[in-house]
Amino acid sequence: MIALILKRLVATAFVMAFVAFFVFGLLHLAPGDPAAVIAGDIATKEDIERIRATLGLDLPFHTQFLNWLGAIMQGDLGTSIFSGRPVSELILQRVEPTLALTTTTILLSVVVAIPLGIAAAWRAGSWIDRTMMGFAVLGFSVPVFVFAYLLIMVFAAQLKLVPVMGYVSPFKDLGGFLRAIALPTVALGVTYVALIARITRASMLEAINQDYIRTAHAKGLGIVPILFRHALRNASVPIVTTVGIGIALLIGGVVVTESVFAIPGLGRLTADSILRRDYPIVQGVILIFSGIYVLINLTIDIIYILVDPRIRY
Amino acid sequence: MAIDTSAPSAGAMARVGQAMRWLRRHPTVLAGLVILLTVTLMAVFAPLFTIYDPQRLDPLQRLKPPSAEHWFGTDQLGRDVFARTVYGSRVSLIVGFTVAAFACIVGLVIGLVSGFIRVLDPVVMRIMDGLMAIPAILLAIAIVGITRSSIWAVVIAVTIPEVPRVVRLVRAIVLTLREQLFVDAAVSLGAKLPRILFVHVMPNTMAPLIVQATYVCASAIIIEAILSFLGAGTPPAIPSWGNMMAEGRTYVLVGWWLLLFPGLLLSLVVLAVNLLGDGLRETLDPRLRRSTNNE
């Protein structure tokens, strides 16, 4: 078991090393000379050279990469070209709205999607099932920003139930936070709900056809304990895996959703930084998002190894 | 002579008839095909569908709601939204189809090689895991960022995040095929590796690969639209559904038509591709029939 976990940890380290190398390589290839940007318009050639030397940009590629990697290990993600402030500081300022949005989305999606998937599997082939599967295909097909604007048009512009955009911190005004976060949560959650509902249906279908479910029926157990206690528990591995894998999807959606609803989070920071060609920030955010994704999936895998003795990679 | 020419066409007729019957039993696939064909015709023959030039400005006709004259209304510069929506289909379809083709070809070759050559497999798969760890949209944005904005930069940027998914699919199939008797037979007959891979193994990956291609296409269309929407996609001079919505977003409260029509078309096309994919999967790929995930 410990060997298995170690193997998984080594693989994860390789994956992160590749991500870091790839992201650094991309920045290196990016057009524009950061030294010239920082030096400004009136700088002389010597000024630019001096800044280049202080930034270590005159060193060979592999030395630069190792220096950069060393700095990252100490939590230093570099300096924003646009504002001149440390990237880690800019990112920390933006964490709260993103964390709030993803948390509400994951909670809402899981609470909505799993019962939907169970109902569809329980009544496979019925109208409940077909409607659910139809909505799932729609959920995969309507891009997050299109759905977001549909929601804004109906619930904010026409019905005026919620604000059009903006963000309120839950620590300042919980009611305001809930009203502001409602539409972004639904918009971001749709694809995620579709993903989880489909996998729940598929793995529940598999579980429902097993002998122990027939036994549970035979001993007169009600449908609710059968579905939730017996079937769902055995169907849970692919569902939890999909919830984890789906977080990559969610992160991509966050960039778009925050941009639509003007939420000052990490996604908005990324979108703004792309337009300003502020690569250190883009690089930092990609690294952090990928790191979170890899960590979540590593955690899920390790929990499985600990909990389910059948799992062998 | 008469028999020679009629025999294959009779076979072809039978096959068309078979396809028609199959389509009648799968109305959602038929709907998807009809939508996709209509939009493709619209993209190819765009000038025949509208009398307006998508770039022509008309300062007197700014932000007019849909009317008999301007079916989808006009935008903030007085351009005809219907014309721009029609021309905008070109970017989405080009990106969707070329990315699906590129990603499947590249993914197929890497997957075949990685699945068959044990030494390469762990290295290739860790690289693929690394690429998959970076959210597709961020990866695409980062790649577009280092190139000049053009439709080909977008195609490459959207292809790279899609490749690992194809590789994993192909490799998983190759791993099971490698243990099969017909591969052993080919090896013991002295067949060389390329022959085994491309003649014996590759044909068996085709059915799931075609299904995967439709999902790659749908995802590519969405990612392109998101890139354009965020201002990291095709140059603003070329109308695309994504950049139309980006330009219209400021007017969400006063000009709903600027956002609604390109958004609806975009969703409709992706839906059509997904319906086609689901139908093909059900028929072509019994192995995948029970799983419902895209992965």
Image (cartoon, coloured by chain):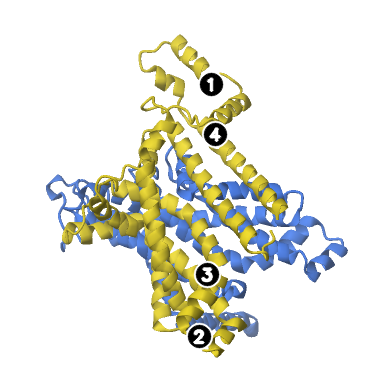
Chain colours: A yellow, B blue
Q: What residue did someone put label 4 on?
A: A24
Mark nearest the camera among 3 and 2 is 2
Q: Residue B116 vs residue A159: left or right? A: right
Q: Are marks 4 and 3 on the same chain?
A: no
Which residue is pictured at 62% across the width and 80% down the height? B8
Q: Earlier in the sequence, mark 1 or mark 4?
A: 4
Characterize the local packing of mark 2: few (<14), some (14-19) or many (20 or more) Cα atoms within 10 angstroms.
few
Residue A35 percent coordinates (x, y): 45, 20
Q: Circles 4 and 2: CB distance less than 8 Å?
A: no
Residue assigned mark 3 = B292
Disc 1 or 2, which lies upstream in sequence? Answer: 1
Of the numbered discs 4 and 2, the one sitting upstream in the chain is 4
**Residue A57 disc label:** 1
Residue type, mark 2 in image? Leu
- Spatial CA span between label 4 and label 2: 58 Å
In the rendered view, does B174 fall on the left or right side of A271? right
Task: Kindly indicate whether the residues beneath marks 3 and 2 are on one polypeptide chain.
Answer: no
Q: Nearer the viewer, residue A25 or A242?
A: A242
* B250 lies above or below B206: above
Task: Look at the numbered disc 2 and give the secondary structure of its residue.
Answer: loop
